[in-house]
Image (spheres, rainbow, N blue to C red):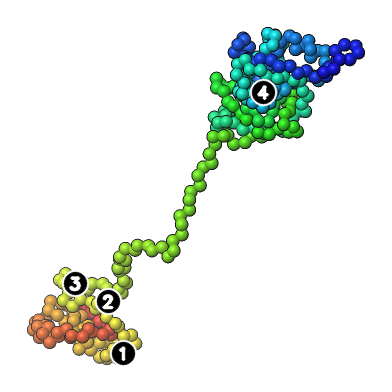
Amino acid sequence: MYFGGYGYHGTSFEQTYRCYPASFIEKPQIESGDKIIMPPSALDRLASLHIDYPMLFELRNNAAERVSHCGVLEFIAEEGMIYMPYWMMENLLLQEGDFVQVKNVTLPKGTYVKLQPHTKDFLDISNPKAILETTLRNYSCLTTGDSIMVAYNNKKYYIDIIETKPSHAISIIETDCEVDFAPPLDYKEPERPVAPAPSKGPAQVEEGPAEDEPKFNPFSGVGRRLDGKASKNPLMPASTSVPIGKKSAVANGKGIPSATSTSQSAGQTQGKLVFGSNANRTPKEKQKEAPKDAKQEQPPKEEPKFQAFTGKKYSLRG
């Protein structure tokens, strides 16, 4: 401050006051902003100075070496006292009745600010950006390192000022400022699943005993008799090897098999009707010869071989 020839023409204001929270007076609205209440003498001093409007002040706690910035709401406080929001007293580490130095300053308009909520609850608000824009209308300036308070739905949310541009303290009155958010202080990144360590040897898969798959057996049908009795000579087993290409013994040129062939012998059993070259025999002769043939025709030890063209001749006369 200096004294000119025509009166008091200082260019700065600096004064020390005792600070008290806003709860001491009926001004609860100042808790939702950064404006303080000063005595009337401060207005008289500021009116006589060449200062920039809106009025912005630097608050300094010399004992704790803490600095913040604020605006002014009214000049109705008692002389030698100022009232400020309680969250500002917490930032400056001030108690009720402590001394604080107040000085008028000029701050540049802010272009960028980075905020960090204390808890994740602030992000659970349906529209945190709109709530923040509404709340910052009550603020005049922001200082890097401060923690501002946002009141919403009967709950208080504290937000740290991580970074401000173009200076460590900026004015946010009538300015377009870009806002960015950092993860909340209590935010924890989800744990990534730990990949299992690769085994040294190839993984051994316990395999149960393999079930025996049924093999395909061709010609595994069962012979049926016309009289309904069980057949004494079942069909050739499927495992029997069948030579293909050998000529069968033929009794005559018409392809009729001989009487000694295996298939015809198997057909000349007792109680079986035989159609073919032996059709002229009487039933009695067939019955007499049947036991002899049954005794003579015993299945050989070796398995019979496949004979091609061993069809039988049938007569409609019977």
Estimate how packed mark 1 is, as few (under 14), some (14 to 19) or many (20 or more) residues with alpha carbons within 10 Å. Answer: few
Of the numbered discs 4 and 2, the one sitting upstream in the chain is 4
State the mark number for residue 61. Answer: 4
Tell me the distance, in whole angstroms, between the alpha carbons under discs 1 and 4: 124 Å
Position above or below: 25 against 94 = above
Residue sitting nearer the eye, 46 or 27 = 46
Q: Is 215 left or right of 85, judged from the image as shown? A: left
Q: Quickly name the residue at label 2.
A: 238
Q: Quickly name the residue at label 3.
A: 226
* Secondary structure at numbered mark 1: loop
Of the numbered discs 1 and 4, the one sitting upstream in the chain is 4
* Secondary structure at numbered mark 2: loop
Q: Residue at x 62, y 33 (%)?
A: 116
Instruction: Give the amino acid type for the residue marked by disc 2 in the picture.
Output: Ala
Residue sitting nearer the eye, 308 or 158 = 158
Tell me the distance, in whole angstroms, between the alpha carbons under discs 4 and 2: 108 Å
Number of the front mark, 4 or 3: 4
Tell me the distance, in whole angstroms, between the alpha carbons under discs 2 and 3: 23 Å
Tell me the distance, in whole angstroms, between the alpha carbons under discs 3 and 1: 30 Å
**Residue contact at pointers 1 and 2, CB within 8 angstroms:** no
Q: Find residue 292 and report its image quarter.
A: bottom left
Instruction: Give the amino acid type for the residue marked by disc 3 in the picture.
Output: Leu
